[in-house]
Amino acid sequence: MVRVFVSGCYDLLHAGHLQFFDEARALGDHLTVSFANEGILWSHKTRRPSLPDDHKAALLAALPMVDQVVSGDGEVQGLDFEPIFRKLRPDVLAVTEDDRYGDIKRALCDEIACRYVILPKTPPQIEPISTTEIVQRIAAPREVPLRIDFAGGWLDVPKHSRRGGFIVNCAISPKVSLHDWPYEKKAGLGGSGAWALLEGRDSVEAELNLGVGWQDPAVIRETGICVWKSGQRPQLDFKRDGSFLDGLMALVWTGSQHDTPGSVDLERDYDLIEAAGAKARQAVMEESVEMLAEAVEMSYQVQLKEGMNELSRVEGALAQKYCGGGHGGYVAVLFATRELRDAAVEINEEILSAEPWCES
């Protein structure tokens, strides 16, 4: 009888594990699955398992391709299975191509005359998912706000960041979910960052992988009106709950979608962007709507110089600018009073009211 041995955390079983077990079992006549026990998992990865050890053992043992389940308690990182492995002396140790501990596992196999087999990555039977991704899906929020950016946009793109620069933005309601999205798509409100967060993905990494900045997922997760330091990753300078903007914000759809990734490397006035970010920071610090309006107008001047179309002035508006960095999407409008905002919304059905959102 050829006895095959595999090891891992197997904290949350998924289809990738089952495929690996099937392929490992095909190497012999008997499959032993070893998992790191709770104490070792904490020692090696500083986290508790999602299931108690006895529940995990019962689930693994119930799989048709698994003949034996053991628990590893070895202290060596990557070799938590070593004590039971030496005791059982299997014929084959099966590992995956991306195993980080291949060298020490191979050395252990050589010592006890066990065949070391690397299973090639075969086409997945089901779309791959990791334990970390499963945990992120479980922890993903049901709904999140979108955002309005006031000033400093583009200074959150790592290659355009400036030491001493600031980005100022505000989370807004109504919120969105995977099943309820009361806004236009590709609209400059941080939708792609919100979608990644709702799906349980690392939303900052998702945005950076698109070649854009991190400000959208940063404020969507933080909520409130936020001042961020320009840099490679989000670093909050300070925030307010945004109550001084209650009843003063609105959105107007331009009629066309925008493309932020396609606009990243256009020429623009970064000195004026930095100045607008600094003024907006001071405005939030003093909770001054008038000063924030000045920063918004400075940002709008940057957009005009970049080549965006001049906007029609919304009646009663204190300031306005395109949301996001693309040519199109929504326009953010700031009013001096709630009465002016509500009047504009009432006379024009294309104008949507927006409120600051801050998690309590």
Image (cartoon, helix red, strand yellow):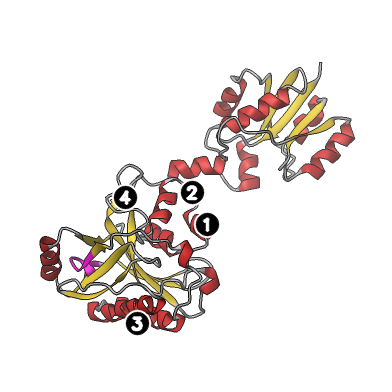
Residue 86 position (above or below residue 205): above
Are there few (<14), some (14-19), or many (20+) residues within 10 Å of tag 3?
many
- Taking 290 as reference, is 140 above or below it? above
**How far apart are the alpha carbons under marks 2 and 4?**
16 Å
Q: Quadrant of the C terminus?
A: bottom left
SS class, disc 1 = helix
Q: Which residues are magenta?
A: 243-250
Q: What residue sits 43% from the left and 80% below the top?
A: 274
Identify the mark nearer the N-term, 2 or 4: 4
The CA span between labels 1 and 2 is: 8 Å
* Label 1 crowd bin: few (<14), some (14–19), many (20+), radius 10 Å: some
Mark 1: amino acid: Glu
Q: Position of residue 187 (x, y in %)?
A: 34, 59
In the rendered view, does 354 fall on the left or right side of 8?
Answer: left
**Tag on residue 176?**
4
The disc, 4 or 1, on the residue closer to the chain's N-terminal end is: 4
Tell me if label 1 and label 2 are in contact, CB under 8 Å.
yes
Q: Which residue is mark 1?
A: 205
Identify which amino acid the numbered label 2 is placed on.
Arg
Label annotation for residue 97: none
- Regarding mark 2 in the picture, which secondary structure is present there? loop
Q: Residues under labels 4 and 1: Cα distance?
A: 20 Å
Which residue is identified by label 3?
279
User: In this image, 209 relative to 45: left or right?
Assistant: left
Q: Amino acid at mark 4?
A: Val
